[in-house]
Amino acid sequence: MELATRSSTAEGMAEQVARFDWRHSALGPLPHWQAPLRIAVDMMVLSPFPCAVVWGAQMTVIHNDAYANLLECDGHALGQAFDRLWAKAWKAIGPWVFKVLDGGSFIVEDQPLWLTNKQTGSRACYAFSYTPLRDEQHGVVGFLHTVIETSASVDAHDKWREQALAFERSIERVMADRDQIWQLSRDAMIVVTRDLRLQAANPAWQRALGWTEDEVGGKPILELVHPADRAEVEVAVMEFVCDRGVKQLETRLRHRDGHYRLFRWTASFDGTLLTAVGQDISQDHEDALRQSETMMRASQRLDAVSHLAGGMAHEMNNLLSGIGGSLELMQRRMEQGRLEHIDRYVALASDSVQRAMTLTHRLLAFSRHQPLSPKPLDINRQLTAMEPLLCQVLGAEMRIDWELDVKPWALCLDVAQLENALVNLFVNAREACLERGVVTLRTINKRLEAPFPDEQGVPPGDYVALYVTDDGHGMPEVDLARAFEPFFTTKPMGHGAGLGLAMVYGFVGQSGGHVWLESVPDHGLKVCMLFPRCLEHIAQEPPQPIPAVTRASGQRVLLVDDEENLRSLMKEYLQERGFDVCDVRDANSALDRFRHHGPFDLVVTDIGLPGGFSGRQVARAMRMFEPAQKILFITGFNDQPLDTQLSETPGTALMLKPFALASLMNQALLMLSD
């Protein structure tokens, strides 16, 4: 009966310890406790004596019910400091506490204390016992405090004393059994030889990283360390061996699946082997980034919209003024019969048009309405192929440092837009470094276990991170909060429209990823991009053939667009280049011409048409009559220009307005050459 009562009491105390909010105590959250502490607590609650585990520099107390009955404080004493709970008796017991923390074990019977049991109301004389407790590095970090009643008979006292000593000896045996700690520890534990080869790893390490001991046993540990961290790890190991080890080291280890996890390590060296204990802090690191990103995105939305409208109006006014002025002067010279230098006005107007096209493309990229042509790719191979272009952008007095993951996961991206985004980032880096500095390109596999940076962000899963870091002047926090706004720029007037980062923001988001900035003034800027992992096979596709001809040979084209002026220009240009063009303004007319005046070698149709009948529906209807009909879609703006069924159908292509008329002709020739 007594045994059942003790078991029930122990179970109740264990539940209290588990429910207690340890996050605000010196011990931290219960899941992060070291194995020796958890083992000591599990045994303490089973003790038949008033007993407490005292742990850490703050001497935090974890006690059983019998121990709480002898304390003068009201309520429980979980998480309180030992010296505070025993303040009235500290003069007598304080010296023994310091002795046990030096590694000694004592039962103090010549300084008994009279204590009142709050449960029974009886007052009795008690002796104190102190047993040292050690952590995973075998250093003393606390003690077991046992209280023994001494006011009973001599025989009873001797019996209780012997039981107390037996209990303490069992505690010492368990705590000294490092193999048990090795097996039960929730922290990763490894043993490394002098030449940095992994000799052993505990189950927690294997669970965290997915490797079995047979797969990595005897192999160099540096093969699993992220390349950017290897030099730091080698230096740290040398310092540990020379007994000058740093208190903690943070480094990343490669998971068996290919991503990296961040660990905070402590270690000890016994003259032959290095034993390291590591806590997985990957989630803590992601939580910190998530909180930082959420704070940064708390900006004034209405102000951003106002800024966008103002910037758009300013840029378009400049461009339209250039176009209008050139046309006005051209018309005047033609009326005067003065045709010399008229090509100069044409060039000025063409330049303004080209700049307007670039502006609209960047705005569409920011708004995530830009049609993309993603394909599976190896990001390292793609970045290496872009190296000549990126070096040219940086100039002769800057260099690129490469920190590429050894085995990055595949991505599915639009190569042209990736190149455009990197060019924009490298231009910004060159200007921030005043054309003298270093830009670091880094790729790394990342596994998110929670949405990032918040519930509205990218979902948990596998991603590849692409970091672009410069050592320029950096960016203050107030500018970081607005950096992705279109037309926001810190550059002098005339040195940029402020659309580069906005375009990068839209491209990454439209690719299913996330982008954020990290910077400290005078310490550079880091652009961080997360792209979702692609599980498709990376095909080795041959380059697209370029048509050998520059003119058509009478192929029939049906042109559908409700914009009268643009349709007229496209028709005239295509006819001059050898096409036979039939043009209409709406869907019904297009279908009528297709049925009664066909066949047509190519149909060029706008997606947005009047009358509630879109270009997509026109294409589907035409292919009901002619399944192999080739169709070129053109569009100025659409959330999803083509659905999967249409875009994957052979003989289908898409062009985004505005485009050069020569590009339209080249695309038509390319489609007709297949």
Image: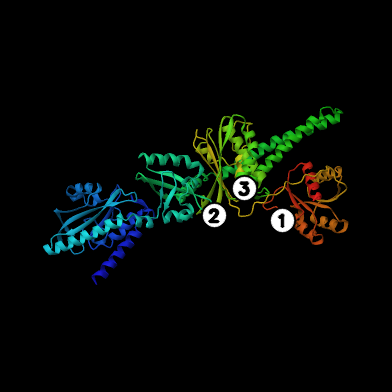
Residue toward you, 47 or 526: 47
Element at label 1: loop
Q: Is any part of residue 280 visible from this angle?
A: no
* As drawn, 101 above or below 352: below
Q: Label 1, on which residue? A: 648
Q: Measured from the top left, where is residue 9 in percent x and y?
A: 28, 65
Element at label 2: strand
Q: Label 2, on which residue? A: 461
Earlier residue among tags 1 and 3 = 3
Say what amino acid the circle numbered 2 marks.
Gly
Residue toward you, 563 or 341: 341
Q: Measured from the top left, where is residue 234 in percent x and y?
A: 44, 40
State how far apart marks 3 and 2 are (Cα): 19 Å
Element at label 3: loop
Q: Measured from the top left, where is residue 371 in percent x and y?
A: 68, 49
Q: Is residue 169 toward the left or the right of residue 364 in the image?
A: left
Residue for point 43% across, 39% down: 235
Q: Which mark is residue 148?
A: none
Looking at the image, do the residues carrying marks 3 and 2 touch, with CB atoms under 8 Å apart? no
State how far apart marks 2 and 1 are (Cα): 27 Å
Say what amino acid the circle numbered 3 marks.
Asp
Q: Which mark is residue 378?
A: 3
Earlier residue among tags 3 and 2 = 3
Crowding at mark 2 (Cα within 10 Å: few <14, some 14-19, many 20+): few
